[in-house]
Each structure stands twice: as C-alpha cells, then as structure tokens.
Image: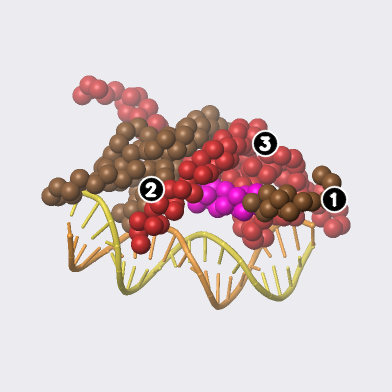
Chain colours: A red, B brown, C yellow, D orange
Amino acid sequence: MGTKHGASELLVNADLARADSLAREIFSEVANKWAFLIIEFLGQRTMRFGELRDEVGGISHKMLTQNLRMLERNGLVERTVYPTIPPRVEYTLTGAGEALRSVVDGMCGWTQRYFSHIETSRHRFDASQL
Amino acid sequence: MGTKHGASELLVNADLARADSLAREIFSEVANKWAFLIIEFLGQRTMRFGELRDEVGGISHKMLTQNLRMLERNGLVERTVYPTIPPRVEYTLTGAGEALRSVVDGMCGWTQRYFSHIETSRHRFDASQL
DNA sequence: CGGCATCCTGTTTGATACTG
DNA sequence: CAGTATCAAACAGGATGCCG
C-alpha cells in the first residue's frame, strides 16, 4: 500500500468500508436462532403461518411475525396473502432463502455430527466448575 | 410404522426425542451473531482475548467473555492460560469449532453473494411500508 | 491482561386483547 | 386465521470497579 491516493481510490475504499459494515449488519440480523429454524422448516415446503408456528414450536405468535417480516424485508421469504375469509397467508423461501438454507442445513448436520462431543464437553466443563 | 411397539422400541423413541430437543437446544445456543463472528475470526488464527476483542469489534468485554465461556463449554474453543504477569490467555478453535467454521464461512459467502439482492429487497420493502 | 461481580438501563419477549 | 397494539416481566448488555 503506497502513500499516494487518487480521489477515486479513496471513494472505492469508502465504498468497500460501507459495504463491509452493511454486510456485517446483515450477518448479525439474520444469524439468530429463530430465523435459522424458520428457514430450515420453510425449506421443506411452503407453509401457512399457523403450520410454521406448530413446526418451529416454542415460538410465540409475536416472535414469528417479527422474524417473518425481517426475512421478507431481506428478500429471503416471500409472503402471499389469499384474501379469503378467514385469511390465508403462505410463506415460501426465495432463491436467496434457499441458498441460506443450505448453510443452515450444514449447521444441522454439524449439530448431529458433534452431538456427543458437545455433550461430553459440557459435562466435563460443568464438573470442572464445581 | 406398525401399531405394536416393544419396550425397547419405546425406549429408542424416547431417546430420539431427548436427543432431538437437546440438539435443538445446542443449535439455539450456538446460532447467535457473536458466537459466529468469534468463530469466524478465531478460524484465521489463535488469538489472545484482547486481539479477538479488537478483531470482532463492537463487542463488550463482558459479551466476549460470556460467549467464549459458552463456546469453551460446548467444546468449540480451547482456552490456554499462560500464568505469566501480566496474564496471557489464548483461544483456539477445536476440531468441532473448525467444522462449524466452515458453516459460518458458508454464511459469509452467502452474505457476499446476495448482498445486492438484500439491499434492493430492503429498499423495496421499506418503500412499500410508507 | 484477563476475569468476575455489581449495578443499572434499554431492549426483547410473552401474554392478552382487539381488528379485519 | 393472521396481524397489530399494549403492557409487564425478563433478560441482555454496557459501564464500572476490584482481583489475580
């Protein structure tokens, strides 16, 4: 890296810095347990709000709504409303969502693979903390 | 799936159910942004507490300690203390940690790949919410 | 330097109730 | 059925100070 910078080079650096912090922001927003679980289950098939709630399990109505909105905003999930009575709303993964699902799948596989390693490690750790 | 179950089959099912909920618990505990960022940076090289704090950036002393303990407890990170003055503590990824890092790397790649898709989607969404 | 305990604040969350 | 609002409870997180 030299000590001379043209104006355009400075702009490029500024752009990279902006992109980087935004990338980190996206990363932080999406990397949470509910989002991952939702993506994992939605990957299996399109589901209605209530189905998803049952599948995920242990998530409150409010949390599911919040996370679905966040995922929709980021273009990972598509929301389709059928204006019937009672209302019917379906959620599907988009291409970006499917792509992230393969990452989440990787994590599921990891959990299975290292399951006993983790259990053992936990016991050892807890025992050592008396 | 028949309607008759032997005692051992019931036990197996019970075990699977226990393992499943534990797996989900592990999944939920590890799938958070700080843990992912820590794993990502530690994957590059062994680091001291302070280095890691600087690399991750924006994480408080307390959060870093908490997450490192959690990762150590689950056997993803190994903690080495050098009893010098001042103290020197190094953190390294274990095999399980490295394995999870490849998942996190996948997510980093995903973020880069869909970066502009996400930005566009966000703008569209925010505009539609007036 | 790194860890732990404490206090204190603001965010997250669940429960509840009401709307279309 | 799905969404939104509101409220209280619970928790996460930052700041600070002291210890090894």
Q: Which residues are magenta?
A: B16-32
SS at circle 3: loop
Residue B99 rendering spot, x and y as whole percentages: 47, 34
Q: CA distance from mark 3 to mark 2?
A: 36 Å
Q: Which residue is mark 3?
A: A94
Quarter of the image where the N terminus of chain B is located: top right
- The residue shown at (79%, 51%) is B5
Amino acid under disc 2 = Glu
Amino acid under disc 1 = Thr
**Badge 2: chain ID:** B
The outermost residue toward the left is B85
Which of B76/A16 is in front? B76
* Residue A9 is at least partly visible in this image: yes
Q: Is residue A3 left or right of residue B123?
A: left
Which of A77/B9 is in front? B9
Q: Quadrant of residue A95?
A: top right
- The residue shown at (83%, 51%) is B4
Residue D17 rendering spot, x and y as whole percentages: 20, 68
Instruction: Assess disc 1: are there few (<14), some (14-19) or many (≥20) residues with their C-alpha within 10 Å of its C-alpha.
Output: few
Q: Nearer the viewer, mark 1 or mark 3?
A: 1
Q: Is residue B18 magenta?
A: yes
Q: Nearer the viewer, mark 2 or mark 1?
A: 1
Q: Is residue A89 magenta?
A: no
Instruction: Assess disc 3: are there few (<14), some (14-19) or many (≥20) residues with their C-alpha within 10 Å of its C-alpha.
Output: some
Q: Is residue A47 left or right of residue B42?
A: right
Residue B72's disc is 2
